[in-house]
Image: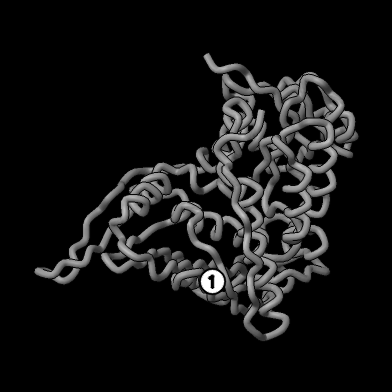
Amino acid sequence: MNRIVKLGVVGCGAIAQHHLKHATGNEGIEVVAVADVREEAARATAAKFGIAHAYTDAEELFDNPEVEGVILALQTRFRTELALRAFAKGKHVLLEKPAAMNADEVRRMIAGRGALSAGCCSSRFRFFASAVAAAEFVRSGALGELRLLRSRNLAPATPPKDPPLAWQYSREANGGGVLADWGVYDLDYLLGITGWTLRPEHVFARVWYVPPAFESFIAAGSDGETHVSATIACQGGPLISYERGALQAAKREHAWQLVGTNGSLDLYLLPQEEKEIVFHAASKAEGVVSRTIWKGTESWAAVHAGPVVDFAASIREGRQPSTSLEHALTVQEIVDAIYMSSESGGLIAVRPVDYVDEEVRTQ
């Protein structure tokens, strides 16, 4: 039997509850401590999941010798400094998404990580069996030379049932709006299922803010975007055509496609009943021949369980998580370039990311 990995969680909000549910339900993980500046939240969470230690200061959790790895499940603006402090105490780190406020912060974390395992939860949707099947299909070379990655996701505005989240469209708290909230998932998914082989070089983009009719649907003072569209040129020719919108005056739309010289692959990010991945193959005799390469039903459970189970496995196996800090840096470099392009109105060069051998770290 694999040894049990002992974890601590900093932040006891909504997303932490998902981490804790799946961590405490996994026989290879033991959560030994939680921390939150709200003492009542920390104590209530510890009691709910049967966790021995509840702190109001993350430093106390880092000082606990039982804790091997830490999940930072709190606002983006706090993650980098806490991660660096955790690294200094010899703790492995899993960051909520986005990994940081900007690419420079991710680079600081890479410099401070040393031989520890560290990654980001933007990998969530790649733990689906459909995503694994798509990645294997791409790796097989069946698509030929990759030309275009297309992702368009629009969500219509609906009046909120609960008070709007103050951080969700806040540049100060979250680093941005819908791009920081959902875009990092989209980019991680596209780059991940293509094996992190694409190297973005230039970005041309625009972001827009909440339509006047829907201003009451978000928290007062929100300054993050609700709509983003970008073209991302990658080394060697492939393009990423990307759009994500929330609170839109538009019908719901989710369209994912990889286009290559030998055919195209239709994908879908979210869990779905009777989900299919369809390959449209180029045929000299018939033109285009379509076939389903994967079919099944998926639920949100895999979305929430995947990152924490993979994080524990990365510690146990001496490797980096599914989305390493280097991968998170690639995503963040694109995000930063999108914001800069929209602000300047021009084309922005993306700083290259140097990948390392992430499968095995120095013991």
The reply to whether residue 276 is in sight is: no
Q: Farthest residue in the bottom direction?
A: 345
Rendering colour mode? one colour
Q: Nearer the viewer, residue 31 or 93?
A: 93
List x then y, in percent, for residue 308.
61, 35
Q: Residue at x 62, y 66 (%)?
A: 334
Q: Is residue 80 above or below residue 206?
A: above
Give the side of residue 8 with respect to residue 25, left or right.
right
Q: Nearer the viewer, residue 210 or 36?
A: 36
Look at mark 1 in the image and give the residue it sits on: 243
List x then y, in percent, for residue 127.
49, 42
Q: Residue at x 41, y 45 (%)?
A: 132
Q: Residue at x 18, y 63 (%)?
A: 289
Q: Secondary structure at mark 1?
A: strand
What amino acid is found at the position of numbered circle 1 in the picture? Glu
List x then y, in percent, for residue 239.
47, 72
Q: How many discs appear? A: 1
List x then y, in percent, for residue 306.
54, 38
Q: Which quadrant of the figure has residue 202?
A: bottom right
Q: Is residue 139 above or below residue 218?
A: above
Q: Residue at x 23, y 63 (%)?
A: 281
Q: Nearer the viewer, residue 124 or 118?
A: 118
